[in-house]
Image: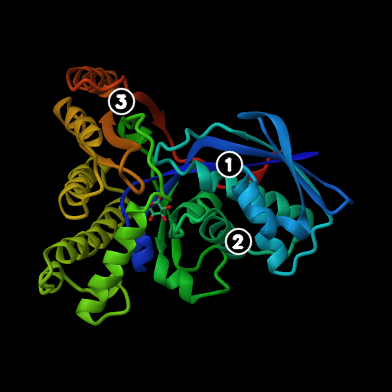
């Protein structure tokens, strides 16, 4: 048996831009899902999970699609990856998968893409060695979209596969979609993200309120963005040049959704430029905070707990703070001076208590490596 890992992610900036063919800027987390795997010869897939002790799931590769509704929810991610490889003509004679996840579930840190990408790299090395990074991203995303039923963009899977240690990944989603042969180096750029050098830390504050991508809110936002693009006569909101153009939309909700996407794309490019130029990352702080206000007011995907966490971090001296991921729960990131981290954590705890919320979980993250084999 060999073992592969794939990381969770936080997006530094660029939320709800991926399915609008815009820009994103994630880092991979040091928190990973491990997948220990070996081939079988009996045509069956066996999936066990350390987090789900008990009977492992055992399904014939040829029956994966038909059995989909009968397998437990958690196992649909790994089984979806096997099914998608098989659908693409990769011969899988059977496989044993043992999973062990350390990415908090429902925290907006992309535990699901970490899971599907860990399985995807394992299956690539075992059965489809010619697959490109791009194909792995597509396979993992198809597993989530078609097999699990979560209509995600490709931010999370791209981060899990393409990120490198010490860097943020600037991804131009439209360029990436257009270039089917894109491997490393096309439509994306590794931008140095070294906070320690500037005495800074990136603190994650997990509200503990789980978010769900399959509950309809996320799909509703996607539909609203498509409707806003149609109202402006463009293919995707990526094509809208300025917030003033977005403001031409008559419908108030669609106008605000479009304004978020347009201003968020601009924020990604502004942050990327500052980091690329080697400026003090404190300079990106206000842009992160603006991104939060936009997600809260225009895109309306924040929650009171996320807002409390952002406000607490800023009040305690964070240079910038914002919710990350799809929203409706999950986590906040805060850019803080190293010596202020504990003060920010205390401030968040106090404000959560005052608001009648359970203690948040907090931890510091650094940009880690994308998916790879570890032994
Ligand atoms: C979730 C989705 C991503 C992306 C983010 C919001 O994490 O899986 O594709 O849309 O929300 O930026």
Q: Which of 152 and 146 is in front in this view?
A: 146
The residue under the point 54% across, 53% down is 148
Kindly identify the residue that appears in the image at 68 percent across and 64 percent down. Answer: 131
Question: How much space separates mark 1 and mark 2, taking CA atoms?
Answer: 17 Å
Comes first in the chain, label 1 or label 2: 1
Q: Distance between the residues labelled 2 and 3?
A: 39 Å
- Relative to residue 200, is residue 54 drawn left or right? right
Please give the residue where the numbered disc 3 appears in the rendered image.
338
Pinpoint residue 39: horizontal percent, then vertical percent. 83, 48
Crowding around mark 1 (Cα neighbors within 10 Å: few <14, some 14 to 19, many 20+) is some
Mark toward the start of the polypeptide (2 vs 3): 2
9 lies above or below 343? below
Mark 2 — residue?
139
Q: Which of 250 and 102 is in front in this view?
A: 250
Q: Label 2 CB, ligand 1: below 8 Å?
A: no
Q: Earlier in the sequence, mark 1 or mark 3?
A: 1
Q: Is residue 56 above or below residue 114?
A: above
Q: Residue at x 69, y 62 (%)?
A: 85
Q: Vertical placement of 6 versus 161: above or below? A: above
Judge left or right: residue 50 versus residue 343: right
Quadrant position of the C terminus in the picture: top right
Per the image, the residue denoted by label 1 is: 74
Secondary element under disc 3, as helix, strand or loop, is: helix
Q: Disc 1 to disc 3, how far (Cα)?
A: 37 Å
Res 31 seen here = yes
Residue reaching furthest front?
A: 70
Outermost right residue:
41
């Amino acid at each position: 048996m060999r073992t592969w890992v794939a990381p969770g992610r936080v997006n530094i900036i660029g939320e709800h831009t991926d399915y609008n063919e815009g820009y994103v800027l994630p880092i991979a987390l040091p928190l990973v899902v491990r997948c220990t795997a070996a081939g079988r010869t009996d045509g069956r897939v066996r999936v066990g999970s350390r987090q789900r002790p008990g009977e492992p799931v055992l399904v014939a590769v040829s029956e994966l699609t038909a059995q989909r509704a009968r397998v437990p929810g958690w196992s649909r991610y790994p089984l979806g990856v096997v099914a998608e490889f098989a659908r693409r003509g990769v011969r899988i004679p059977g496989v044993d998968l043992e999973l062990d996840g350390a990415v908090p579930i429902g925290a907006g840190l992309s535990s699901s893409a970490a899971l599907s990408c860990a399985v995807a790299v394992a299956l690539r090395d075992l059965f489809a060695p010619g697959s490109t990074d791009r194909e792995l991203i597509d396979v993992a995303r198809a597993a989530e979209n078609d097999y699990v039923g979560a209509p995600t963009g490709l931010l999370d899977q791209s981060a899990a596969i393409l990120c490198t240690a010490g860097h943020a990944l600037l991804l131009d989603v439209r360029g990436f979609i257009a270039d089917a042969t894109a491997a490393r180096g096309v439509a994306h750029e590794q931008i140095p993200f070294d906070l320690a050098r500037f005495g800074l830390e990136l603190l994650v504050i997990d509200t503990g309120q789980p978010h769900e991508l399959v509950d309809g809110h996320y799909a509703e936002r996607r539909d609203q963005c498509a409707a806003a693009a149609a109202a402006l006569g463009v293919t995707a909101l990526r094509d809208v040049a300025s917030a003033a153009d977005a403001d031409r939309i008559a419908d108030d909700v669609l106008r605000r959704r479009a304004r978020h996407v347009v201003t968020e794309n601009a924020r990604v490019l502004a942050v990327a430029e500052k980091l690329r130029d080697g400026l003090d990352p404190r300079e990106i702080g206000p842009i992160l905070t603006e991104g939060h206000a936009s997600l809260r007011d225009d895109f309306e995907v924040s929650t009171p707990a996320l807002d409390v966490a952002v406000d607490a971090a800023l009040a305690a001296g964070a240079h910038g703070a914002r919710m990350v991921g799809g929203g409706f729960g999950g986590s906040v990131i805060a850019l803080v001076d190293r010596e202020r981290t504990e003060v920010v954590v205390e401030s968040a705890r106090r404000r959560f208590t005052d608001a009648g919320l359970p203690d948040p979980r907090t931890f510091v993250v650094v940009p880690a490596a994308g998916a790879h084999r570890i032994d």
